[in-house]
Image: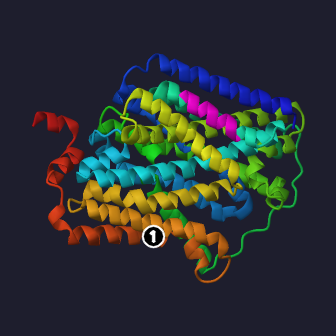
Amino acid sequence: MNPFVGYLSIAAVVLATVLIGFFGLRISRTTGDFYVASRTVQPWWNASAIGGEYLSAASVLGIAGLILLRGEAALWFPIGYTAGYLMLLLFVAAPLRRSGAYTIPDFTQARLESLTVRRVTSVLVIVIGWFYIVPQLQGAALTVGIATGLPRWSGAVAVAVIVGVVVAAGGMRSITFVQAFQFWLKLTALAIPVVVLLFAVRGGAGAVPVEVAMPLPTVPGPADSYLTGSLLFALLLGTMGLPHVLVRFYTNPDGRAARRTTLIVLGLLSVFYLFPTMFGILGRFFAPDLATTGEADALVLLLPSRLLPGPVGDLLTALVIAGAFGAFLSTSSGLVVSLAGVVSQDLLGGSVRGFRVAAVGSALVPLAVALLTEPSGLAGSVGLVFAFTASTLCPVLLLGIWWRGLTARGAIAGMATGALTCGGSILVAPWIDAGMLAPFLAQPAAWTVPLAIAVVVAVSRADRARIPRGADRFLARLHIPEPARVAD
């Protein structure tokens, strides 16, 4: 692959990101602009921005790589990623918007009337955000290394610096424009190459001979069925606890707009995931060797030039590189915005200056982690973040919205239980390669989420005397539509 193609693609995406970001800076004036875009983002804009930040390195590169490795067993990833938004639509979107909070810690403090709950939630939001940013930076390192031949660490550094500067400069309003643009860039960057490659394979210009395909997957055993079920469970529930996704619902004008936003996101994601899936299927026929060389995550980057050598392949590769780099920038931007909001509110007084300082710090810490650790499969890494989120924040959010009996002690106990059991499993799993415990540690959500919920309920019921006095009033605010409250 011509390195000039890589340089040009990355430079174009960076330039567009910076220009759009600084356009947003011109209209970012107030604290509300920086934290929640003054709650004026309309559904189509917000849905595009959510798609931009949600479709991360795992979606653009990792899904195709997993399908190359695992075949049809990997299709649960795009299904779970998309279906998670259905859970958001049914249980979280509108009530969370009506809460009036800026961040998830704001919500838990207001719901449970406890500063301690706020602090625990803040720590978890920061940990989840850092865990999620690290794979984005590692994906950027992979892409820059393949596209330009530069040292891979330069890609991670470039994304961290660009994201830190753009977020610090313009806040949520600026990032909304950036992420909306990058969603459509990512969709175009995968859709056009897939269509062109399918025509080539079917015998059009530059027809490609079929190589020996990957072997079909074997019949799944009990361990495989458990791993698949636990993964799907994590993806369904983990979406409801992702801080960078939830914060976007605070930017809608009202609860009805939040619901419409979620419906549009479901449609956009359903269309998008067709294309990395097709990349993975093409890879199983035309690039099976990448599965054995440890380059499965690079399939999307390498396949166009392999099937169509020459200028056409270079153009398609340039488009794919642009989409991939846009994915790293947009997802990292959303995460840094959510982290900066939490850090600024809890430690730096909630000012615009505090937001900017927090944004820079929120980008640099995961950069250090990414540079000091070895990358693993992108989709698998993100799947574990979903499991951790489903085991910690998700139970408290769901019960906080739908159960009057939740108490501060119950919420803290549940979050601690989920963090210790799920986090401990993730840390221990690489050291246990076989045995009965291996599947339960590799994908722990199927048992850590129910355990966390059970602890929340049990401790809250034992502590029922401390149910917040304002619980009924707060729940009414969450569940009564805005016009009805005004009429009252």
- Horizontally, residue 66 falls left or right of residue 232, namely right
Above or below for 231 versus 488: below
Q: Which residue is drawn at 80% across and 41% down?
A: 151
Q: Where is residue 263 in the image (x, y as percent from the top left)?
A: 42, 43
Instruction: Report the residue that reaches farthest toward the bottom.
Output: 436
Q: Name the residue under label 1.
A: 448
- Quadrant location of the C terminus in the rendered image: top left
Above or below for 141 versus 465: above
Residue 165 visible to an observer of this rendering? yes
Q: Main SS type for the magenta part?
A: helix
Query: Which stretch did the figure color magenta?
Result: 156-166
Locate residue 469: give its quadrant: bottom left
Q: Nearer the viewer, residue 73 or 146?
A: 146
Q: Which residue is drawn at 85% across and 33% down?
A: 3
Above or below for 435 versus 181: below
Q: Position of residue 47 (x, y in %)?
A: 46, 36
Q: Nearer the viewer, residue 431 or 211?
A: 431
Q: Where is residue 221 in the image (x, y as percent from the top left)?
A: 63, 79
